[in-house]
Image (cartoon, coloured by chain):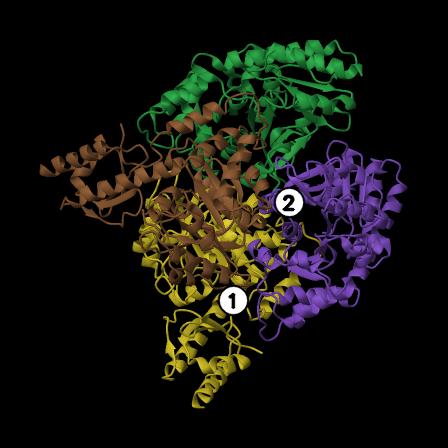
Chain colours: A yellow, B purple, C brown, D green
Amino acid sequence: MKGFASDNNAGVHPEILKAIESANKDHEVGYGDDPYTRQAIELFREAFGKETEVFFVFNGTGANVLGLSSVTQSWNSVICADTSHIEEDECGAPEKFTGCKLLPVPSVRGKLTPEAIEHHLKGFDFEHHSQPGVVSISQVTEMGTIYRTEEIIAIADLAHKHNMYLHMDGARIANAAVALDLPFKAFTKECGVDILSFGGTKNGMLMGESVVFFNPELAKNTKYLRKQSMQLYSKMRFTSAQFIAYLKNDLWKKNAAHANRMAQYLEKEIRKIPEITITQKVDANGVFAIVPREIIRPLQEKFFFYMWNDTNSEVRWMTSFDTTEQEIKEFVQLIRKLLAH
Amino acid sequence: MKGFASDNNAGVHPEILKAIESANKDHEVGYGDDPYTRQAIELFREAFGKETEVFFVFNGTGANVLGLSSVTQSWNSVICADTSHIEEDECGAPEKFTGCKLLPVPSVRGKLTPEAIEHHLKGFDFEHHSQPGVVSISQVTEMGTIYRTEEIIAIADLAHKHNMYLHMDGARIANAAVALDLPFKAFTKECGVDILSFGGTKNGMLMGESVVFFNPELAKNTKYLRKQSMQLYSKMRFTSAQFIAYLKNDLWKKNAAHANRMAQYLEKEIRKIPEITITQKVDANGVFAIVPREIIRPLQEKFFFYMWNDTNSEVRWMTSFDTTEQEIKEFVQLIRKLLAH
Amino acid sequence: MKGFASDNNAGVHPEILKAIESANKDHEVGYGDDPYTRQAIELFREAFGKETEVFFVFNGTGANVLGLSSVTQSWNSVICADTSHIEEDECGAPEKFTGCKLLPVPSVRGKLTPEAIEHHLKGFDFEHHSQPGVVSISQVTEMGTIYRTEEIIAIADLAHKHNMYLHMDGARIANAAVALDLPFKAFTKECGVDILSFGGTKNGMLMGESVVFFNPELAKNTKYLRKQSMQLYSKMRFTSAQFIAYLKNDLWKKNAAHANRMAQYLEKEIRKIPEITITQKVDANGVFAIVPREIIRPLQEKFFFYMWNDTNSEVRWMTSFDTTEQEIKEFVQLIRKLLAH
Amino acid sequence: MKGFASDNNAGVHPEILKAIESANKDHEVGYGDDPYTRQAIELFREAFGKETEVFFVFNGTGANVLGLSSVTQSWNSVICADTSHIEEDECGAPEKFTGCKLLPVPSVRGKLTPEAIEHHLKGFDFEHHSQPGVVSISQVTEMGTIYRTEEIIAIADLAHKHNMYLHMDGARIANAAVALDLPFKAFTKECGVDILSFGGTKNGMLMGESVVFFNPELAKNTKYLRKQSMQLYSKMRFTSAQFIAYLKNDLWKKNAAHANRMAQYLEKEIRKIPEITITQKVDANGVFAIVPREIIRPLQEKFFFYMWNDTNSEVRWMTSFDTTEQEIKEFVQLIRKLLAH
């Protein structure tokens, strides 16, 4: 059964699997000292610049926590959207591992603004107060929206003005790149992002998450933190081989472009149904909608998806690299049928 | 280039890759609520008993830390061998995540004894002293040796007498099962082990580590700890499918038996060379030997392996599921050639 | 120079010093196994009930963190007011030591409401989400206001309905008791509070903070956590002796009643000055006011106090056990003089 | 009842109490921004040099943990004696707060040697291994012995050669200074110690512990760590006033000299009793002895002290600033009487 629950409910793109298979010969030194990893890192450097340091990890939470812990001390705070993954969906991993305080800011459509951040820019040098150390934004946000480059620059400038770092949770960075029609570098490094969680698992990889540092100075202890945070993979070549396949021939772009298109198509079809209200801007591959409560359960039985907000019966529909137009058609048809009752 | 550096330098067994491929269809709910995971868990229950709780994680360090954190509070201590992975090779992950004190005990050939443990069984109820909470043993040990069942029972009895738990790091548990010629259950649960890190990565899996609890009560908070320790995999079906292939048709046994046989063969051939001294009992798939220092570097250039102890030029040679007799022959031949100079 | 900066800028009540002096004879076993500590604990049991467990600690942050860590696991969250001491003024000590996530709730005059709390009562059993474990309220709040008993009961009922605990930060609990004209027990234990930080330092003690548990089951590991959190005092008799003097002859009440009276007097006098606006209800010993910006600096030079909110030039004036009517008169006089310019 | 249990079972020297009383006037800004604290810090700088940074804390565990956490990251290890307070008597506070691994080294009479330390100087740059970061020694050691300056220099040189820091737990530093007949500086800073826990509580203070940094660079984040580790005292003037009285007129020396003399006297008298064997060198104010088991209990009833090693009935007798010759005479007399039975 396919559905719209999450882009991580999809499987693995065949080219990714093929890359794993191709890497499965001979022995390779473990933990990253292998040619696949060297090549994958090289590809990251081609995308982001020569100075880039990149660390492969197991999952998105691992990427976020490793990135944040590399640039914080336990007495720092991390300013983030109240809807962010690090605040809502990581069971306190950031606090537990970094010791930092998270400062969730009421967000608008998943996005932070300089004004909202400024509220927390206080208590500097005052030892009673956790020292603001990082601003963290998600690109794509958890609400399916996207920061424009000027928005990122504004936040980066504010952070840097206060000697803070800007972290971007890019679990869906490929969908953002496609939506913005920009290379990765143009809305990360070049906008002032300092640390990037670069994710591929939600876009067709078996397991492909990484932490990217644009200033190598920030990464000088990351190798120890990666091991200590239980994110160091012994047979790393099999992650690296995936990244090679993912980055080399723009597989990332093909997959994300498709997923985004499917979301737009779904949005278009849904907008024709007056009983349903799209609640968020559809910037990437997520569609949020308020749906008549009575059709949700029967709909979920055929096409699984998650309730987002039980109070107002808002649901989230995610498309993925393997969503088909046909599935969307059937989905919309079923909605119409259920509403007709 | 193949070598004897580590069983995790080997690749993935073809049947494991095939299982991943077979699981790659349709969508599955993420994070373990899928039929592959249910089936894999069922196989663990067949092996260990119905009450068993099992949690899949990313790597061996993750398994050890998740298991230990499930049964400890930060004011506990964990007694382990001074050669153990948790003490020597996890960059302090156990201390960082559990908050516990590790108490390394001088070990003999990688093994703990009740006598050595007893030295640390003190300070109970005394709030100044970390409270002994867990004894952790490795099976196979890091020195390639194996605990006999009566040895495990003796340690378990001692631990339980003091209301402590017995943890087993089974990163190479398959090699132990083959060496002991016993089912997994017979030298774990039935000997009093409470928590088991059950590993498959070193024995032909792409990534297959898990934590097994024989008393479900001990696991009641483990799901939160797994997420918080960054060990929860979104596309978990791809780990579960591997475990199915690994456990269902005794692939684990085939692989481990081969690796052990290769180590015995290597041992046999090496014992014929008077300039080399085997230093540890070869119980499983590791051979430790003192080797004339001058041949180590040239030998490593053809067959990579690690220096174990630089002081006395002791090296470690690991065999794996894909080691061939031919490779060993060539390796021994090269040794003889180098010694002849 | 005396002022209105904080009740902890005051010194020590002479009877407290005398108690320390009286306890200074002979040797006593360290760390709490002494007759002074036994007597002090007895006095807490007289106040709160026989089952009470009490632990003396060094400071208020220590009391809060020890109380919270006794009833949480690292994957829990703690719901608190955005103005609370644990959120704003402890440099992240709660996160660092407990590993928990703090969920600050927009408060009204420093107080939580069931409605505001309910927003965070979600994600139960969902391993991605920090599990709500504790609601923490401050009594007196950081805004100088007080929860009425029915308000506490409503919050306690909500917390307990969700198997959560209610923690009260009672750094100024004496001022609350006087304001409510109730014994300590009537607005803590009897309203459903589970863990209480009971403070005395802000009310004339040299150093007197403690954690009080009404259900001894919650405190069964607290002795280890107190030591591990660096809150165990070797010469504990000297804290215990203070608590004896503080509790035995209602010194706490005399001191707090005086401080509260002085705040009311200050409020009364300030209300006569039209240029100044009292911003919070004066329930205890704190007066918050918006003051013309230009008089703040010269006023602080004679009577030190803190700016509370630089944006609207709101200041905080705290009275203490040793504030005199004469000082308030001079203070108000100076305000009038400065405003006259 | 007075006894020989611990120097922290003694009370407070009258001059210390008087200093507290003298500081008890007017208001002072809290948390260290007061003239007493400034003067106390000045006295530390007179003793240790102008560059010195000093932080007052609540107890010895707090001092050790704050010092270690200031110079470590969680992936570091701390090498210490197996008898050290940080390893044996702090309930895992160092691991919990710093995240570091402690590496206990078998010690001889409580002392580390360069040879024993060297065993752990490995794995540098290797991310699997906790990175050796600090060597920690106690002066006076927990076995009552003292490091000579050349011994400290040798350890410091070894540590610095590996870019590690040398920490000294000086809970009984005054007794060491007297025994060595050297100023504090001569066997700390001038021998290469980097961070010093400087204690006064065991030598007549009410509560006086501190962390001293000889290189201010190491202390640049300590103020945040002190607050976060719950070691920041609001009414700090009352600790500072004690330190002034302690340091200004050499009260520390008077007290420690007396305690040491009493230990020597006790040793001398005990050596005359053939049934008792002194087991450690009596360098400072502790006497360790193997005592016939049957007299221990009755002896403890009159003069409390602790069993040190139950296996061989070794006991520990500590003298303190208020021990009298008369008490020792009575104690020895009682021993003789009990042995006579």
Residue drawn 78% across and 16% down? D339
Whether residue A120 is visible: yes
Residue C192: where, in percent of width, then height?
47, 55
Query: Residue B90 has which mark?
Result: 2
Question: What residue is drawn where x is 55% and y is 61%?
Answer: C127
Quarter location, residue D249: top left
Secondary-structure class at tag 1: helix
Quarter of the figure that contains the C terminus of chain B: top right
Q: Height in image: B256 above or below A307?
A: above
Label 1: which residue?
A203
Circle 2 marks a residue in which chain? B
Amino acid type of the residue tagged 1 in the rendering: Asn
Which quadrant of the structure image shows residue D15?
top left
Foreground: C74 or D126?
A: C74
Q: Is residue C271 above or below residue B292?
A: below
Where C101 falls versus C335 (above or below)? below
- Total labels: the figure holds 2
Farthest-out residue, bottom: A341
| Residue found 67% across the figure and 60% down from its top | B206
Give the side of residue D221 with respect to residue A31, left or right.
left
Picture coordinates of residue B329, whole percent (x, y): 84, 49
Instruction: Check the image and name the residue furthest to the left.
Output: C341
Disc number placed over residue B193 in the picture, else none: none
Q: Is residue A330 left or right of residue B13?
A: left
Q: Is residue B297 visible?
A: no
The picture places residue D145, in percent across and down from the top left corner, at 65, 18
